[in-house]
Image: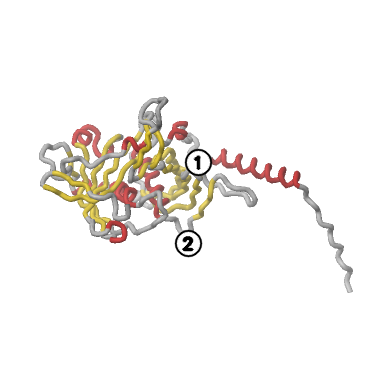
Amino acid sequence: MGRKKKTQPAVLVGKKEIEERLLRMMFGYTDKLNKSQGFDIRGYEGISPILVAHICDRDGPCCDLVLLYARMGLHRYNLVQGKHLQLSSVKMYNRSVSRSYFITLEAKDPASDPVTLQTFQAKVNEVNTKDRSTDGPATDGPATLKTTNGFLLTCTVARRLGDTSISIPAIDLQRNHCNGKHLSYFMPELPPKNPFEDDSKRFHVLKESELQDNDDWVRLYVELAVAKPYTREEQGLDNLKILKVAMDSERYLSEGLGANDATFYIRYEDSCEARVGKDVDRVAVVRRMLDEHSQVLRLVGRHQSITPSSNAMEAGSSSAQD
């Protein structure tokens, strides 16, 4: 018979030691968080992470909403850099309690030969459509409660992995606002005249060739409007058929489709009855605001049913579920 192994006496850890250990872990997590700027970081067991990490793989595929946000990040990069990169996949993302998304993604240039994947980082922030705010300078009176049925998004980072020259701008702290006003102030409306059949030439309707060349971001705008970011409902977006796209003629003539500040009217059909009921004829109204100095991209918009009436547009409900 072999010797019996001596059992080690249990080491009792006091409350103070546990607190010190957790404090060291929190300091380590915070240090990594600061160095990574929120990207590619996982939590520590035993502490509550500031960011919740999601690994996107075969066992846990990325949700549709984050895929849209990844495309928004690439859209910002393309606008600023004059590129035409497309999303290949999302590798992982971190989400904060305030609904900021730190996304690591892979992109490709379909025009390159051979096609190679490049890793990017993008930060997209959801802005609550129900926010107590004032439209102007602070006053002693009560704030105005703004409620909108739509989406308000900002993209403050879109960069290649390892590009340390591009950091999260200070303006990210005021991501809910633009020029001192809450983003809901800039929510676009459907014009009284039909932008797709306007004889006054106030609107430019995209040609078929223009629509084909810009289909990626046009579809992104529609899908963002339909996706309802502030609910957990996920309904397919494959059944959206884009019919016509219009924008202000003056903006089109001066800056083209890549205008920094422009509103787009996108007419489409949605055959998802669970989402829209019988109101399949719809329009998405989306305003793009790209700050040329900070390079922050803001997208605000909504979707609703429409009833064409002569040369006017009659708006219906924003969705069958509202």
Instruction: Name above or below for residue 73 compared with residue 115.
Output: above
Whether residues under marks 2 and 1 lie with C-beta atoms below 8 angstroms apart, the answer is no
List x then y, in percent, for residue 112.
35, 49
- Can residue 77 be seen from the camera position used here? no
Q: Which mark is residue 87?
A: none
Can you identify the residue that label 1 sits on? 162
List x then y, in percent, for residue 302.
30, 45
Residue at (55%, 47%) from the top-left corner? 41
Q: From the viewer's perspective, is 247 left or right of 134?
A: left
- The amino acid pointed to by label 2 is Arg
- Can residue 196 be seen from the camera position used here? yes
Q: From the viewer's perspective, is 121 left or right of 186?
A: right
Residue at (33%, 46%) from the top-left corner? 149
Q: Which mark is residue 58?
A: 2
Q: From the viewer's perspective, is 86 left or right of 192?
A: right
Q: Nearer the viewer, mark 2 or mark 1?
A: 2
In the picture, the quarter occupied by the N terminus is bottom right
Circle 1 — which element?
loop
Circle nearer the N terminus (2, 1): 2
List x then y, in percent, for residue 18.
73, 47
The residue nearer to you, when weighing 2 against 249, is 249
Residue at (40%, 47%) from the top-left corner? 69
The residue nearer to you, when weighing 91 against 140, is 140
List x then y, in percent, for residue 88.
40, 53
Q: Residues within 10 Å of mark 1 (few under 14, many from 20)?
A: few
Q: Residues within 10 Å of mark 2 (few under 14, many from 20)?
A: few
Circle 2 — which element?
loop
- The amino acid pointed to by label 1 is Gly
The residue nearer to you, when weighing 154 against 180, is 180
